[in-house]
Amino acid sequence: MWKITLAGLRAHRRRLLATSLAVVVGVAFLTGTLVLGDAMTKGFDDLFGELNAGTDVVVRPAGASSADEAMGAGTLDAAVVDRIGDVRGVEAAYGSIVGIGQLLGADGARLGGDGPPTLAMNWVPDDEVNPFRLVDGHLPEASGEVVVDRATAADGGLRIGSTTTLLTPAPVQVTVVGLATFGEDDGAGTASTTWLSDDDARTYLAAGQDRVSTVAVVGATDVDADELRQRVAAALPNGAEAITGTDLAAEQSQAIDEDFLGFLRTFLVVFAGVAILVATFSIHNTFSVVAAQRQREWALLRAVGATRGQVVRSTAVEVLIVGVVASIIGIGAGLGLASLLKAALDGMGMDVPTGSLSLTGGTIVVGMVVGVLATLVAGLGPVIATSRVRPIAALRDGEAERLHIGRVRTAIGGVLVVGGGLLMAGPALGWWDGPVARVGLGALGVLVGALLLAPVLAVPVTRALGTPVAALRGAPGRLARENATRNPRRTARMATALLVGVGVVTVFMVFGASATGYVDQSLARSVRADLVIQDEGFSGAGLAPDLGREIAAIDGVEHVAGLGWGTVALEPGDAGPGGASSATDEGDRSLDVTVVDPSELAAVSDIGVRRGDLAALADDEIAVSSEELAERGWHLGDTVPFTFPDGAVEPARVAVEFEHTDIVDGVLLPLGTWSRHVAQTTDAIVMIGLAPGADEAAVRSQVDAVATAVGAPESMDHGEYVDMAAGEISQILGIVYVLLALSIVIALMGIANTLSLSVMERTRELGLLRAVGETRPQVRSMVRWEGVMVAVLGTALGMAIGLAVGWALVGATVGAELDGVFRAPVTGLVVVAVVGAVAGVLAAWRPAGRAARMDVLQAIASS
């Protein structure tokens, strides 16, 4: 049997190669994702490790996160530096004043701010603590002088002597007097860093106060870092804490992993999973046809003494070899794909630090296990099922595969479709509230049920699709229709991989279009401003609060509301009499808040206030959404203690309940309260309401002049603002569609492979058709139209399932909150349908050519 197995492998090399391609592509995408994720994790680990390498202990405001430190949100009294310097075992202590600072390039455009932070700080004069090195020019001495990392300078066309603007977020005119590098690199990853003199850092980053953001502590060589931390901590005043440099680097790595890297890895792994799933269906289809074709071969082996177990084991070896070889090739290809993914991220402005792209043992194991298991699961099922056929029955002439669709299979498929449909439709119809996971479970039931019912649906659907083809193309069209309907199992199998791929694409199309509709309606409902200015990017300097005050002075402007964002910590436990439980556990302490001027926000927005007066919100009060109140267990009138970035704890009374969180977080904090606890206040959005009768065009021109003078973007009217928000969703969907195209390619490979095998199966039939007068062009046309009908079948079923799942997903996400949110993108769906038909032609191109080139006599003589 082993000799027969090896001989079979040698005889069918091309078939095995075609079968393995789907596995190669799926494993390559999975491996590439894992390699890139590992490289990015190592890149950030190395970056944060180098940033903190010379620091034994860091002192910071108590409760501050690594993000707070990076953006200089909290500060400490500068006197703490001398206090720490007197601690036994401390050799040196350096106070760092860190804040947000975004440079404008030579062309006036903002530099950075699309993920990596834009930082401004004072220069620490210790080469062990400061990982940056001055490589050209001199350190800042006079006011207005700055040093810039060489990468940022090159990006912005800046050089020594260049005069530009630093947004802190207030604009400051500066002159570049020096360039610095991060060790051997031009910059610290893709972060932008600007250094000011100590006096300027104090003025612009610490609100003119003698305060520092952190203190870097260097210990004596004979003192352990943990012991030094304990000594320093014992000497700190209330509101400050100490952490070792090693622990800080680990905390920073964990924070970036939980926020950006974790999301990116999950995002890519999901699409890798879709690719593997589609590849599994393609492999299953191929082995199903192969098993049907080899039924007589296996029957002959059993007739001459081979047992059923020997036949199954022999074929299992073939399946295993395909899985192992394809997985090895896929792992190697994944290393190259990781480079392409990295280049794609760089091209989208998401340039992140990475270590070397290399394969780890864990990645190799995952790629091999997933690839081999997917191949075995997909390939052994048809083999085992076919081996159950009695040898004498398999040796008879006739169909190599059972054509009858069992009633049990049909019944189970129907139950799964109906049951899964009800499960996922319940939240959308308002029958019950349910999590998105329940919709996913229902969608899985519908998908499995549809796959079971696909052979049943294949006959009427392909017959309907084939009727116009038969009328237009004559005999080739009629034969293509009959071939598609004659063996519904084979037709359904060929269509299933495309069904899954198109279904996923359709879900994202529907959800994306509906999300755009949600944005349109929610912003139309919540934003009443005539003009809006929004900061570009999401990690830059933001908009200076002075911008709003200057715009408010323009004739024709009646209201100006700036919206900023911040983070506070909730004190665990009860707040005492009349208070509220602030957090359920330590992991639930962080709370994102929107910082606003409540009276101005009330004039330019409608956040659905249910109780209380937003315009009269005092500095010691907060407004909380109904959803946040329910989640936290708070009530109107409760007092909640907040810990601010500077370590101070202040109570706030819940005074307003509102409904809509379209443009704000679940908690609104007055600007007056927030500004007492941070060195820099910044806005992300400025909403402007015009006076009745004001000339919008004239006022907008003046607003834009004020905005551009301080490095802010120009204003948008209400419609432009809505279109901008919707455009961001379209950009994300563009990335999604590119990634999902991979699954479509794998599905088409499956169709092409299965069509090729079916051509081999029908060799004698095709020879007879040629013998009775069918021409080569007619043979090509027949096979191509069969491929088109299969592709359209898969596309149609996939679109139907995708529409249903998309509708249910939108309903579970949005519920009955907004009418008319669900949108089916008709144009996009038509494009998918056309692409599906064209793809069928492409998938059938090679099999059709092969069928047309067959030698007539040899084909008739085949058995």
Image: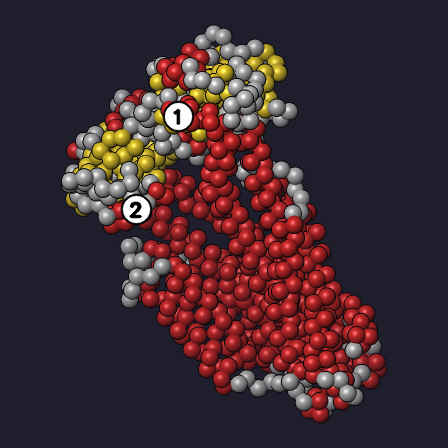
Q: Position of residue 61 (x, y in %)?
A: 37, 27
Q: Is residue 643 above or below residue 513?
A: above
> Disc 1 on helix, strand or loop?
helix
Residue that numbered label 1 is attached to: 233
In the rendered image, which quarter is residue 803 located in? Answer: bottom left
> Cα distance, mark 1 to mark 2?
27 Å
**Which residue is located at x 56 percent, y 40 percent?**
41
Q: Which mark, by number, is residue 129?
A: none
Q: Earlier in the sequence, mark 1 or mark 2?
A: 1
**Which residue is located at x 65 percent, y 82 percent?**
386
Crowdedness of circle 2 by 10 Å Cα count: few (<14), some, many (20+)? Answer: some
Q: Is residue 631 above or below residue 246?
A: below
> Disc 2 on helix, strand or loop?
loop
- From this viewpoint, is residue 70 visible? no
Amino acid marked by disc 1: Ala
Residue that numbered label 2 is attached to: 584
Q: Position of residue 183 (x, y in %)?
A: 61, 24
Amino acid marked by disc 2: Thr
Q: Position of residue 11 (x, y in %)?
A: 81, 72
Quarter of the picture containing the C terminus is bottom right
Quarter of the picture containing the N terminus is bottom right
- From this viewpoint, is residue 275 visible? yes
**Which residue is located at x 22 percent, y 33 percent?**
651
Q: Nearer the viewer, mark 1 or mark 2?
A: 1
Whether residues under marks 1 and 2 lie with C-beta atoms below 8 angstroms apart, the answer is: no
**520 or 178: nearer the viewer:** 178
Q: Could you tell me how many numbered marks the image carries?
A: 2
In the rendered image, which quarter is residue 300 located in? Answer: bottom right
In the rendered image, which quarter is residue 771 located in? Answer: bottom right
Q: Position of residue 642 (x, y in %)?
A: 27, 34
**Which residue is located at x 72 percent, y 66 percent?**
321
